[in-house]
Amino acid sequence: MPDGVPVQKSSFPCPALAFSVGCPVTHESRPPSPFRLWPAQGARQDFVGMRVAVFFERDGILARSASGNGTAVNLEDFRVCEDAVAPLRRLREAGFFLFATTNQPGITSNAPDWRELDRMHAVLVRRLGLDDVLVCPHEPDDQCPCRKPQPGLLLEAARRHGVDLDHSFVVSERWVDAEMADAAGATSVLIRSELNGKGHHDFVVPDLDAAVTKILEIAEELGTLRVMCHRNVAMEPPAAPSAARDHRNGSPSGGAPSRGAAPRKTASKRATRKPRST
């Protein structure tokens, strides 16, 4: 499509089409981009075990506009939040998949266009080690189920990457992300802000470091960490018949547990949620 020509807002691809939730908008194919360098599907092929994720709101948590005008519209204005590097590394080393989510209705007026958006997200993925960036390009009037606070983006991640949403988390400052998490069955961890709103919150913490600490505490309590492993077991030598058994899950010591090694604990997770902070 020629530069400078606005695209009708009904011309964007919608994750909802993949899981058949009845998106009311007619969509066409997303234009290809040479800057979308991260794998759209099949990421983390070395992962074995339960696939549990943390979903981050992009703006304000992982990235910001250098000009202070809200959402960056080009790569020159796009800045990765460097204080997010170490906390996300903790999660990735624990075995979590990491995603950014964002509503980007400005695409309807090419501010930014897909090409520029993919350039920004390529930088974000490379710097923070994300597995994917999930984008909704729709206006509120489109009533599309991939636009937050609807759960479409999380459902697409579950379909595309095999993520277990019941054991996954959403980190944001915004109430729309907390509602999205609740609708998808995930746990919300909000960073305290005037953007928190008055709706449902699972946990409210002071900053990103505290959010990561809370997630790791909950995952440890539920046993989630014990069934997440991202080693490439194909490269591991076979265990000797007399190998010691891991006391935690009954698997060979140091080996990857089976998917059935630990029961689902959705009810227990819900029980650990604390009342909304005031």
Image: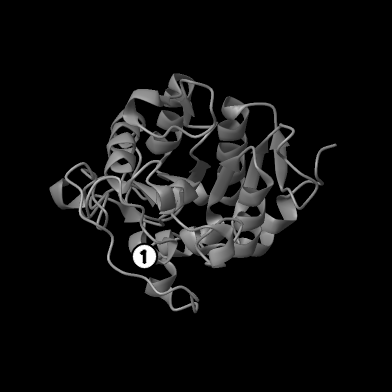
> Is residue 275 found left or right of 165 in the rendered image?
right
The image position of residue 168, as x and y in percent, is 53, 52
> Is residue 8 found left or right of 47 in the rendered image?
right
Q: Does 170 sit above or below residue 58?
A: below
The image position of residue 26, as x and y in percent, is 40, 74
Q: What residue is rendered at 46% in x and 49% in y? A: 53
Q: Does 120 sit above or below residue 8?
A: above
Quadrant location of the N terminus?
bottom left
Q: Residue flagged by tag 1: what amino acid is it?
A: Ser
Q: Would residue 264 be visible to someone looking at this image?
A: no
The image position of residue 153, as x and y in percent, is 47, 59
Quadrant location of the C terminus?
top right
The image position of residue 221, as x and y in percent, is 61, 45
Colour style of the rendered protein structure: one colour
Quadrant of res 269: bottom right
Q: Would residue 92 be visible to someone looking at this image?
A: yes
130, 14: nearer the viewer: 14
| Circle 1 residue | 11
- Assign a secondary structure to mark 1: helix
Q: What residue is rendered at 58% in x and 59% in y? A: 140
